[in-house]
Image (cartoon, rainbow, N blue to C red):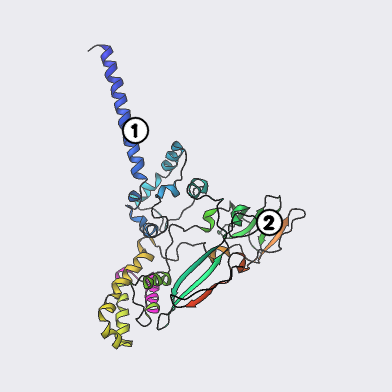
Amino acid sequence: MSQKWLMVFKVCGILVGGLLILVLAGSTWDYSGRPDFCISCHTMESVTRSHQSSAHAEVRCTDCHLGVGFAPMMLFKKATDASQIVKNLTGTYEKPIRIRHNVPVTQSCESCHYTKAFRREMIKVTDWFEDDRNNTRKTTAILLKVGDGRQKEGIHWHVENSITYGRDAEGKIVSVELAKEDGTTGTYRLDGAAEPVTFKKMDCVDCHNRVAHHIDTPSGITDKYLLEGKLDPSLPYVKREAVKLLEQTKDTDPAAWSDLFAGIVQFYQDKYPDVYRSKQETIEALPEILAEMAGQINFPTMNVTWETYEDNLGHDGCFQCHNPSFKLEQASEGAELPETISMDCEICHNMPVTVEGGNKQVVIDLM
């Protein structure tokens, strides 16, 4: 064979090989970015369950955890996490797993959500049940002052202005720095706290930190099952007893859960024998239902329960900064800033209104 044809075969071989490598690399990239790849790992059980029941269930894992951006940069970011493969093979991963670094919201949240189109106010209606004998159903309505992007009011005021918070060595927020567009600045410090060692500018995920991976509390998931009719609200104290048993799973070996949940059958046999006789089939099914509920809020193999990850979308998150113990340390000249960070409930919402029953009219104050 002449040198000419040998060179042609070599070039063709290189081109075909390169094409195959590109196809293989592209297929690998696509497959490793699919949710079914992510959830195939046993360490992902808790986040998989919570993601599948969230409003972001159809959002790919990589859209949030890798972000959307320049392809070579995304490839580099994925390659830097190759150490996770070694940790999985050697069993040296964390239990529970903690996210150390979030993808910038400009590459994740804002690829879908247009942040300049905030709503002004939003009414949130929550149905829940008392833990009394009748499992009394109640409805609570609250007006959330979300904010429409104006600098002076609303929950989204926090991201329309520049707020940087500092944490001490233990992770507690100890300083808050405010910078407004008009040049007003101020720094608040927590009384008697240590010096901050890390700083972060506030963005979406400081409040919406569990938006795709919320894990219900025992009370919350029991309310959900009662609303969906999976638990019979006519059973005396079923809310109270279900919550009590689910809370005990946190400190109980999973192998003993079946015996634990069998206790609810014994409860009705002992305390309400007439109810047990009339609804025996429903009551006998309760242990299996409780096991299903426990599987959604407690993940022993990864040491994850409803208490493991803090959810900042509520009072616990707000009160990290909204606390009168944060006092104004310094401010720009002429700045009209409060001396402390307010805990006034009505900054972010009006006072909630609760009525009994599932079909009652609720009247709330819009002011």
Residue 193, position in %: x, y? 64, 62
Which residue lies at the image location 45% right of the left edge and 63% below the top edge?
A: 308
Helix, strand or loop status at disc 2: strand
Residue at 35% across, 44% down: 32
Whether residue 256 can be seen here: no
| Residue 74 percent across, percent down from the top left | 44, 40
Give the CA separation, mark 1 to mark 2. Answer: 52 Å
Farthest residue toward the left? Answer: 1
When the figure is inspected, residue 29 is found, relative to residue 119, above or below; the finding is: above
Q: Is residue 181 left or right of residue 220?
A: right
| Magenta-drawn segment | 240-256
Q: Which residue is mark 2?
A: 187
Residue 145: give x, y in percent of width and height.
58, 63
Quadrant where the C terminus sits is bottom right
Tell me the crowding category of disc 2: few under 14, some 14 to 19, or many 20 or more residues within 10 angstroms, Cα based.
many
Callout 2, which amino acid? Thr
SS for dot 1? helix
The residue positioned farthest toward the right in the image shown: 334
Horizontal side, residue 85 vs residue 344: left or right: left
Q: Is residue 51 magenta?
A: no
Which residue is the extreme one toward the front? 361
Quick check: can you spot residue 41? yes
Q: Which residue is mark 1?
A: 22
**Magenta segment main secondary structure:** helix
Find residue 245 and report its horizontal and vertical position in percent.
37, 75
Residue found 45% across the figure and 55% down from its top: 98
Viewer-proximal residue, 76 or 357? 357
